[in-house]
Amino acid sequence: MAAVGGRRLLVSDFMLSFMWVWSSVLIKIFVHKILGYGAHDLKGEILRYGISIGNMFFFAFLAKATKGGAYNPLTILSSAISGDFSNFLFTVGARIPVQVLGSIYGVRLILTAFPEIGRGPRLNVDIARGALTEGVLTFAIVIISQGLSRKIPGSFLMKTWISSVSKLTLHMLGSDLTGGCMNPASVMGWAFALGEHISKEHLIVYWLAPMEATLAAVWAFRVIVRPEKFETPKVKSGKSD
């Protein structure tokens, strides 16, 4: 049964990663080409961000429906760090590569269908500032995610709303510098299609920095927010005659 569950997760990860890279492109096509809003049109930007939040709700529902499917390596890495070693190996050795593969095939199909669509996230600053930007953004979203899972257990709508708004806000803060990605798999899809997947800029900014930030965020959360300890009431045993 464990093997069946593992295969189901891998299929879910592949499909969600494939769909995620497509969703962002389809949103841009809908807002800018179908509705005709300009790149810096305020109404168009507000509409695009609103649809993006709805899109994140949709993927959160898919993750719940698939019982753990994910499209972002950082999401499952932060959980794997807190789990057992076998789960960590499965995450790093199977789930993350499958997510990258799903993103690569998704971008390949995008460029085949819409060759004029662009080239994905761009690094507009030097490597050090880019790595710092992606690291800080990743650290923030992982801390928020850890806090939501601890402080608001079971509230799907509230957690998804806070998480979606947080991701969108952080994305906006970093979009002019690195693209505000916080998702190594989707960036890898675009970089592989353009032959830039083994460049120093890509590996340091979009892989090394977010991974290190994820590890740091999980460690910091454990230090700052310690697990609650529940004291069990002591039962006094009376002497029997």
Image (spheres, helix red, strand yellow):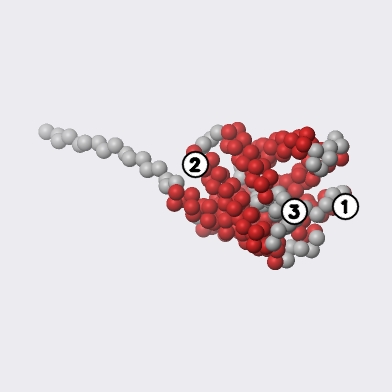
Residue wearing tag 2: 150
- Tag on residue 115? 1
Rendered location of residue 96, percent (x, y): 65, 56
Check disc 2 and give the amino acid type.
Arg
Q: Is residue 49 left or right of residue 148?
A: right
> Do the CB atoms of the residues marked 2 and 3 lie less than 8 Å apart?
no
Q: What crowding class fits label 1: few (fewer than 14 Cα within 10 Å), some (14-19), or many (20 or more)? A: few
Residue 66 visible, this orientation = no
Q: What crowding class fits label 3: few (fewer than 14 Cα within 10 Å), some (14-19), or many (20 or more)? A: some
Residue 210: quarter of image? bottom right
Rendered location of residue 117, percent (x, y): 84, 49
Rendered location of residue 141, percent (x, y): 59, 47
Give the distance between the C-alpha atoms of the residues marked 2 and 1, in whole angstroms: 43 Å
Of the image marks 3 and 1, the number of the one nearer the N terminus = 1
Looking at the image, which residue is at 64% across and 38% down?
A: 165
Mark 1, secondary structure of its residue: loop
Mark 3, secondary structure of its residue: loop
Looking at the image, which residue is at 54% across and 47% down?
A: 143
> How many numbered marks, from 0 up?
3
Q: Is residue 36 left or right of residue 48?
A: right
> Do the CB atoms of the residues marked 3 and 1 lie less than 8 Å apart?
no
Give the distance between the C-alpha atoms of the residues marked 3 and 1, in whole angstroms: 16 Å
Looking at the image, which residue is at 86% across and 40% down?
A: 33
Residue wearing tag 3: 121
Of the image marks 2 and 3, the number of the one nearer the N terminus = 3
Give the distance between the C-alpha atoms of the residues marked 2 and 3, in whole angstroms: 32 Å
Q: Is residue 231 left or right of residue 6?
A: left
Check disc 1 and give the amino acid type.
Pro
> Do the CB atoms of the residues marked 2 and 1 lie less than 8 Å apart?
no
